[in-house]
Image (cartoon, rainbow, N blue to C red):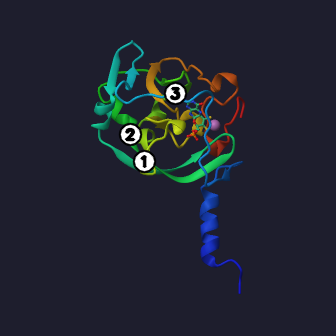
Amino acid sequence: MNSFSPGFQGRARRMADKLPPGQYPTESFPVLSAGPTPRVPTDTWRFTVTSETGGTHAWTWDEMMALPQQETVRDIHCVTRWSKFDTRWRGVPLDAFFEDVETAADHVVVTSYGGYTTNLPLEDLLDGRAWLAHTYDGDPLSPEHGGPARLLVPHLYFWKSAKWVRGLRLSHEDEPGFWESVGYHDYGDPWREQRNWGD
Ligand SMILES: Nc1nc2c(c(=O)[nH]1)N[C@H]1C(S)=C(S)[C@@H](COP(=O)(O)O)O[C@H]1N2
Ligand SMILES: [Mo]
């Protein structure tokens, strides 16, 4: 008897198709934080979108939770080479926060409680490609993984998914964030292996 059933090979092939170059799959959920874990109570939590002209929109926790919620199951890819398949999140697609925002800017700097920043093209946050996530695998997102709420931008390396997210600042200029200013790739597409400057 063949030691690999067709079912196993089919599953292995599907897994390989899900794995970007240079990555390995993991079942665990590593914690990667550049500093201490901030504790952000939901009663003082705010999420703000600031346009390039300085206009600000802000949401309290309750206002954010009253927006249309979505569950999404995604693969995530860390530049330190682990990938985790089929992670299950609940949160608000970022499109909802831009409904009343007038902007001509193309770039966003994401800011976090604790001081972390990361930069993205605005279009990568829209059209259902990014979420403000507050629930992981059915439970409130733990502080270590960015609770009460983090960004989820699964199509880019996971350093773009800012934990303890506080706001988005729109800009005409592309301003590098925390990791991008010390050598990480400006965009960070895992399928093109954009790990570092010049990749
Ligand atoms: N605020 C903040 N967000 C962050 C980080 C961080 O240090 N601070 N690390 C980034 C990196 S490098 C990765 S790989 C992921 C890790 O998320 P996890 O700890 O939930 O696995 O968060 C990203 N978001
Ligand atoms: Mo990372």
Among the two numbered marks 1 and 2 on one chain, the one whose residue lies closer to the N terminus: 2
How crowded pointer 1 is (Cα within 10 Å; few <14, some 14-19, many 20+) is rated as few
Q: Which residue is mark 2?
A: 93
Left or right: where does residue 17 sit relative to residue 90?
right
- Amino acid type for the residue under numbered disc 2: Pro
- Amino acid type for the residue under numbered disc 3: Pro
Residue closest to the eye, 190 or 38: 38
Q: Looking at the picture, does residue 185 appear above or below residue 23?
A: above
Q: Which residue is mark 3?
A: 38
Residue drawn at 72 percent across, 48 percent down: 22
Residue drawn at 64 percent across, 79 percent down: 5
Point out the image quarter for the N terminus: bottom right
- Amino acid type for the residue under numbered disc 1: Asp
Residue 139: image tag: 1
Measure how far apart labels 3 and 1 are at the Cα level.
19 Å
Q: Position of residue 151 (x, y in %)?
A: 47, 35
Instruction: Nearest to the eye among marks 1 and 2: give it.
Output: 1
Query: Judging from the image, what secondary structure is the residue with disc 2 in?
Result: strand
Point out the image quarter for the C terminus: top right
Q: Is mark 1 within 8 Å of ligand 1?
A: no
